[in-house]
Image (cartoon, rainbow, N blue to C red):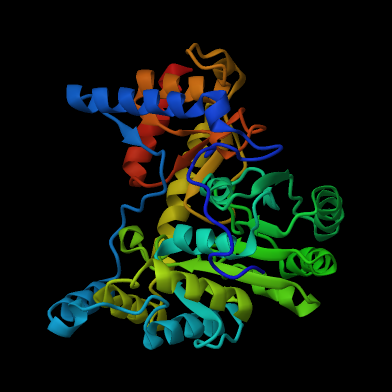
Amino acid sequence: MKPPGAHAPRLFSDPGRLGAGLLDPYQMGLHDDLDELRAIQRQRAVEGTMVWDLSMVNPDLAPPRQVLDRLLESVTKTANHRYAVSRGVRRLREAFSHKYRSRFQHELDPETQVCVCLGSKDATFHALRVLVEPGDAVIVPVPTYPAHPSAVAMSAGQSIAWEAPSSPEEAAHTLSSVVAKSQAKVLLVNFPSNPAGTVVSRQWWHAVGKVCAEHGVTIVNDFVYGEMCFSGQPAESALWATEVGARCVEVYSLSKAYNVPGWRVGALVGDKDVVSAVARLKSQADYGLFLPLQYAATQALVATEDLVSATVQTYQKRLRVLSNGLQQVGWCVVPPSAGACLWVQYPAELHAAKGTSRLRSVNVARHLLTNAGVVVTPGVVFGATCDSWVRLAAVVNEERLRDVVSTVRALS
């Protein structure tokens, strides 16, 4: 692993180079397509036409009351408006350690294995920044959260697509093949996943971890939805891969589980060397999170009562409404096991939706927005092979989701 600053960052001379097997939005014109969709949405807003924006997992639910109370209390103290600590105050790092011990059965040293970051994107980018040399291959599963290949590109790496099976044996076999061909240095994954809501087992992490340990591949897992499983139990942390010798770091965030996306509270946890390198890099990049937010986040992480289950149940109910409704009108739906969004294949009749893009999912998104006022994310945003899909975020209440289904039904 290189030290921070070992190479100069690429200054976006080629920001769209996302690597073999994944979509290059700059070459394929996707950014222009998305700009057009946003323009249509803005025009509808100006005209006062109804819009249901399900394009982004931007929680509409309220943060826990006791957490807000702690924030308000902290804001009134003058000392809390001074510079913070780039890697997070000790009590917040201890709170992340408490969360991992109580919910995920992993012991973390708050001094060496936890670095507070400005949300999951910040943590992921800095982890890649210290792990990736220019041109290094980074394996990402498809469909992939779009911020991940972007972070790889900004780290001067090359994204390599991997169709990640849910079976541990198949995952190990296919990953071995991809690693051998690409000589990858990092496996960047997101389980439970966005957009598909896929959850993997501890055995899966062991199988994948053995491959990564054998080939010297570092695992980076985006664990934002770790507590948002519909089984009633938290997901298995990627840190189980360390039991078979893999080097692993994980990104945890409060954004979705605690409904505080604007707070930008996350952490990189796990391997001491990677966490230490990120902490050193951050010491040159920022002064850390606003102190009242750190203290409020601490309150959330160590609360004795369950502050997450109500949010999870709400998303589960909303997604059931969407799943059942869209299935009834011919959409192919696999209900998610976790998360806050629905990953669906649109019906055959929408394949012929007219539009200016050569990407079908973009034309379908335009059709839904123009004729139904429903904003979805085209599947091709999540990978070049995902053009038959769209993603819908369950960020409006059940009544409005029923309205969405009714409006979509009227198009059929």
171 lies left or right of 187: right
Q: Is residue 117 visible?
A: no
Q: Residue at x 36, y 45 (%)?
A: 398
Q: Residue at x 42, y 63 (%)?
A: 119
Q: Residue at x 58, y 69 (%)?
A: 250
The residue closer to the viewer here, 321 or 55, is 55
28 lies left or right of 119: right
Which image quadrant is residue 176 in? Answer: bottom right
Residue 249: x and y, percent?
Answer: 61, 70
Residue 80: x and y, percent?
Answer: 20, 81
Q: Residue at x 50, y 84 (%)?
A: 97
288 lies left or right of 309: left
The quadrant of the rendering that contains the N terminus is: bottom right
Residue 397: x and y, percent?
Answer: 33, 47
Above or below, 249 relative to 114: above
Q: Is residue 358 visible?
A: yes
Residue 109: x and y, percent?
Answer: 55, 88
Which image quadrant is residue 4 in? Answer: bottom right
166 lies left or right of 65: right
